[in-house]
Amino acid sequence: MGRVVLVLLVLVVGTSSCASRSPGGSVVTAQPKLVDLAHILPADLDPTADCAASKDPTPKGVVGLADQLNCIEGKGSQIAGGYVDVYLFETPAALQDSFTAINVTYNFFPASAGKTCPPKDSGAEGRLSWKNGDGHGTVECYGTSDGGHVYIWTNEPAQALFFTKVGKAISFGKLHLWWTRTGCCSANM
């Protein structure tokens, strides 16, 4: 007679980072559950209409990438036509390492950046910390050589990084207003 083998597969997903003791006495740390990107997108983005899985090459030095979307702001947005790239990382360390790599790729120098976003001069750079509700991270801003404007920010609890670029028709002030009302601080969290 043949044997019957029963295989039981158990999948455990941690929902928070916490430590517990295993029966052998060693410390076991549960990893945080990865966030669904739709829940952290800027509030004016419709993930089904405005976003698609990224086909862009990953910037050099980006590590631990769990997911990536490319989005274009729709006609109803304050920054209509603006690009929003969203990166979700597997760990906080991957987020920080990749943030540094993206700064190198785009020639952003945090040490020389001012402490305001938007910067006082369109050719200047700015960098500061932000916090709103459960979200917090770093925001960076700078003008591009073609007259456009960029905001890059992290949402550390979500292990996410956002890269937004608009053309010169959208002012730094308008981009900043969008970011504070829709981008960082009013996401679908």
Image: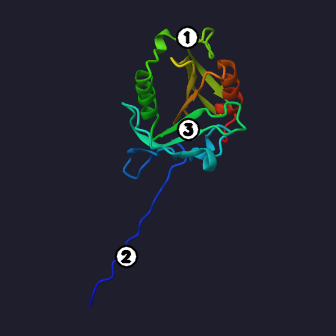
SS class, disc 2 = loop
Residue 92 shown left or right of residue 116 in the figure = left
Residue 8 vertical position relative to residue 51 in the rendered view, above or below: below
Residue holding disc 3: 158
Q: Quadrant of residue 78?
A: top right
Residue 40 shown left or right of residue 34 in the figure = right
User: In percent of the image, x 55 and y 17: which residue is there?
Assistant: 142
Task: Give the amino acid at mark 1.
Answer: Gly
The label on residue 6 is 2
Which of labels 2 and 1 is toward the front? 1
Q: Position of residue 42 (x, y in %)?
A: 64, 37
Give the spatial CA distance, label 2 vs label 3.
Answer: 38 Å
Q: Residue furthest left?
A: 1
- Mark 2 or 1 closer to N-term? 2
Quarter of the image for the C terminus: give it: top right
Quarter of the image for the N terminus: give it: bottom left
Residue holding disc 1: 123
Give the spatial CA distance, label 2 vs label 1.
Answer: 66 Å
User: In percent of the image, x 38 and y 47: which residue is there?
Assistant: 25
Task: Give the amino acid at mark 3.
Answer: Ala
- Mark 3 or 1 closer to N-term? 1
